[in-house]
Amino acid sequence: MPDTNDRVRAVAWVDDMLHLLDQRYLPAREDTLVISDCRAAAEAIRDMVVRGAPAIGITAAYAAVLAARARFSADGDGWRAGFEQDLADLGQARPTAVNLGWAVRCMREKAAGLSGDPVPALLELARGIHEEDIQANRRMGELGAQFIAPGSGVLTHCNTGSLATGGYGTALGVIRSAWAAGKLDAVFADETRPWLQGARLTAWELVRDGIPVTLLVDGAAAHLMKQGRVQWVIVGSDRIAANGDVANKIGTYSAAVAARHHGVKFMVVAPSSTVDMAIASGADIPIEMRAPEEVLGCGGQPVAAAGAQAWNPAFDVTPAALVDVIVTERGVVEQPDLAKMTAMMK
Ligand code: MRU
């Protein structure tokens, strides 16, 4: 059961259905979307009902169960062809978070060895992926918090908490653990335009946990660092390349550049399912481009001058050289490079 520092579940399997807490409307409304088929799950990922790399992967695992159930019930022993098609479509829902492709691959490999009704074994695997993610986050919380000296201030970007994962969170898990250990004087969160994951989601999680949080506009981060108010920037990741380059929410790279300039340390926290050893460097990580309307408006209201265009990359890549430490559940890599990443992922 979630403890006092982990009360939220973004993804749940309830009564043979996939339940997603609809993150588009938080914190104003806590709506749950009940999903019964794989296509609706893919749409939910695309539309940001569920977001955050690990939560997307877990959703995909449960979506594969829904696909198998529908195909087995419609086609009996001929279920595999339709199932494969469903998984291929699901895998396209969002391009940057490698956890999506990773979860689809795990489910496909499991399915290949099954005969008869595939649902019980696939559901067991999906539940296992979900549970392991929570355990990994707990472990990373401990590992990451060890780097933080008592009396520190930290800055985080986007949302990497229970809402973005199976539970507890990656970067936010480290912040939760460091807070529980009495090490933190202040937690700052970038609001994270254009979806405001920091203002809407990170602040919501931390307030519920009773952890004081101070929001700032993304452009204020360098000024905060200059004032010496934070010792660590702590972020998650959507994909980490073999050389330690890190893709994460747009604005992470700016925070890393500013951190290095001001002598602030930069920590990336992500489960090993986010590490993509098949990709040599960040240059090869696909960056999702989203609709211009997300930038031209805010909360559904147009804000930009009519006629203006917008450029809306959802992620950026921080070079390994700007990363002080990568924390995974397998261990910690300081000053990441190919050799150290390879050793950790072996
Ligand atoms: O577009 P989003 O909200 O899915 O982006 C999420 C992030 O960039 C997170 O930092 C990342 O997925 C890690 S979540 C533990």
Image (spheres, helix red, strand yellow):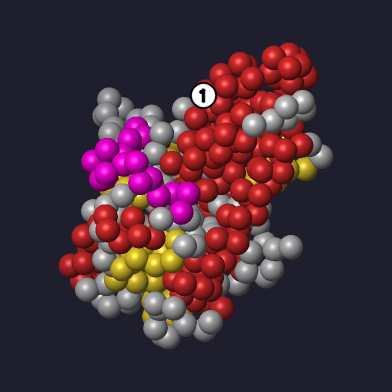
Establish if 115 lies above or below 171: above
Q: Is residue 310 magenta-colored?
A: no
Q: Is residue 135 visible?
A: yes
**Left or right: 266 in relation to 55:** left
Spot occupied by residue 95 in the image (x, y as percentages of width and height): 41, 34
Q: Is residue 282 magenta-colored?
A: yes
Which residue corresponds to the image point at 47% horizontal and 72% vertical from the top-left?
A: 143
Spot occupied by residue 99 in the image (x, y as percentages of width and height): 48, 43
Spot occupied by residue 82 in the image (x, y as percentages of width and height): 62, 17
Q: Quadrant of residue 14?
A: top right
- Mark 1 belongs to which amino acid? Ala
Q: Nearer the viewer, residue 200 or 49?
A: 49
Residue reaching furthest left?
261
Q: Nearer the viewer, residue 212 or 117?
A: 117
Region rendered in magenta: 272-289
Instruction: Determine which residue is flagged by label 1.
Output: 88
Which quadrant holds the N terminus?
bottom right
Mark 1 crowdedness (10 Å alpha carbons): few <14, some 14-19, many ≥20:
few
Disc 1 under 8 Å from ligand 1? The reply is no
